[in-house]
Every structure is written in structure tokens, then in C-alpha cells.
Image (cartoon, grey):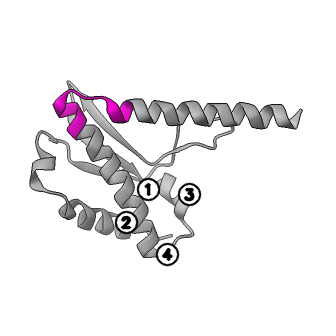
Amino acid sequence: MLDIDEVQDILDDLAYELPEEFYKELNGGILLLPERKISNEAINDDLFVLGEYHNSYSMGRYIVIYYGSYEALYGHLPREALKDELRKTLRHEFTHHMESLAGEKDLEIEDERRLARYRYRARLKKLNRR
């Protein structure tokens, strides 16, 4: 796995790919945090959070990317493949940002559908083990 500084360099490059307009009201920018984050929805600690979009009254709007989660899931990937995964996550979180500015929630709804499918598959696995 690339170290956190190398991943930060990649993330900086990916951020420059996006139009300036995407950064409107993103006052907190893009943060790369070292931790590994497990979703509250995880069953058996198997659902990592790669990134999050935050919009709060006190902290404003910002995007967080979790280095430790990438390390856990994609630590084996070569640089370019890891960059592709980071690009997907960054654009996903920017979509949340843009939708938030527009008062839309389509991606939030899709994320909830994905979580519902995850929970369903987990229940099926549990039933099949019985």
C-alpha cells in the first residue's frame, strides 16, 4: 500500500481534475484522515466507509476520505488501480455535495438502496449457514 502522503498526492491530483464550480461552498475542502472506518451498518465489521460528505451548521461542508479503509480494502492494488478507486469515491462524495446545494437526495436514496441490498445478502448468508 502506498503511504498516506502518496495517497494525499494522488487525491490532490484528482481534485484538480474537477471543475472549480464543484468547490462552491465546500468551505472545509477535502480531508484525508488516517483512520479505518467501519460503517454503523456493518455486520461482522465487513463494511468499510471509504469517504463521507459532511454538511453541518458548525463545520460547514467538507469531504472526508479514510486512508485506513483504503488500506484495508485496496492495499494490494497497484498505484493506478488505487487512483481509480479514489477517483470513484471522490466523485461520489462530490455528487453528494452538488445534490446538497441543489436540494436533491437521489444519491442518498441510492446509497440507502445499496445498504438494504447489503443487509439482505447478509441475512441470506446467515440463513444459509444454519
Q: Are marks 1 and 2 in contact (CB under 8 Å)?
A: yes
CA–CA distance in space, label 1 to label 4:
15 Å
The three-letter code of the residue at mark 3 reads Leu
Q: Which mark is residue 67?
A: 1
Give the mark nearer the N terminus: 1 vs 4: 1
Residue located at (10% from left, 49% from top): 21
The three-letter code of the residue at mark 1 reads Tyr
- Discs 1/4, front: 4
Q: Which mark is residue 7?
A: 2
Residue 25: quadrant of the picture: top left
Q: Decide if residue 96 is in sight here.
A: yes
* Place of residue 16 in the rendered image (x, y in percent of width and height, measured from the top left): 18, 63
Provide the residue span drawn in magenta: 98-108
Residue at disc 3, secondary structure: helix
CA–CA distance in space, label 1 to label 2:
8 Å
Q: Which residue is mark 4?
A: 78
The three-letter code of the residue at mark 2 reads Val
Residue at disc 1, secondary structure: helix
Give the mark nearer the N terminus: 2 vs 4: 2
CA–CA distance in space, label 4 to label 3:
13 Å
Give the mark nearer the N terminus: 1 vs 3: 1
